[in-house]
């Protein structure tokens, strides 16, 4: 029996454009860029272009981020579920990472 370890990659098909919610998610007061070389995500856009991004860790949960977004952008009509779906693939919530990681604000 041969057990071979194979590396897996996450390919997310999404179009990443600099819109209001995208810029909100990558702000330094909303998310933190992880420093490790292995903390990357490979994203594939609709045209088939592959781009490597560093993971960013959200400081707050999605509900709190949605409230901050709606306070700052009162003219944008966006419900919470759509706001969560529009999150860039390289911006990850804290709950998806190991619990032994400490983040100091």
Image (spheres, grey):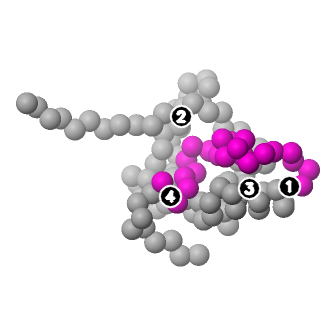
The numbered dot on residue 12 is: 2
Earlier along the polypeptide chain: callout 4 or callout 1?
A: 1
Looking at the rendered structure, the number of numbered marks drawn on it comes to 4
The numbered dot on residue 95 is: 4
Q: Position of residue 92 (x, y in %)?
A: 54, 52
State the image quarter where residue 49 is shown: top right
**Label pair 4/3, CB-CB below 8 angstroms:** no
Earlier along the polypeptide chain: callout 3 or callout 1?
A: 3
> Which is nearer the eye, 74 or 11?
74
Q: CA distance from mark 2 to mark 1?
A: 27 Å
* Element at label 2: strand
State the image quarter where residue 61 is shown: bottom right
Question: Which residue is found at the position 74% from the left and 55% from the top?
Answer: 66
**Label pair 3/2, CB-CB below 8 angstroms:** no
Q: Position of residue 50 (x, y in %)?
A: 52, 32
Q: Is residue 84 magenta?
A: yes
The numbered dot on residue 73 is: 1
Q: CA distance from mark 3 to mark 2?
A: 22 Å
Instruction: Specify the segment rendered in magenta.
Output: 74-96
* Element at label 4: helix
* Element at label 3: helix
In the orientation shown, which residue stands out farthest toward the left? 1
User: Does residue 18 appear anywhere in the picture?
Assistant: no
Which of labels 3 and 1 is toward the front?
Answer: 3
Q: CA distance from mark 4 to mark 2?
A: 19 Å
In the orientation shown, which residue stands out farthest toward the bottom? 104
> Which is nearer the eye, 38 or 104?
104
> What residue would you read off at disc 3?
66
């Amino acid at each position: 029996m041969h057990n071979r370890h194979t590396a897996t990659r996450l390919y997310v098909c999404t179009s990443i454009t600099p819109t209001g919610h995208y810029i909100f998610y990558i702000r330094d007061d909303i998310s933190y860029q992880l420093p490790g070389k292995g903390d990357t995500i490979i994203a594939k856009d609709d045209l088939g272009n592959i781009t490597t991004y560093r993971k960013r860790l959200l400081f707050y949960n999605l509900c709190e981020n949605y409230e901050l977004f709606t306070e700052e952008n009162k003219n944008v009509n966006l419900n919470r579920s759509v706001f969560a779906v529009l999150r860039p693939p390289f911006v990850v919530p804290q709950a998806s990472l190991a619990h032994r990681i400490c983040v100091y604000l």
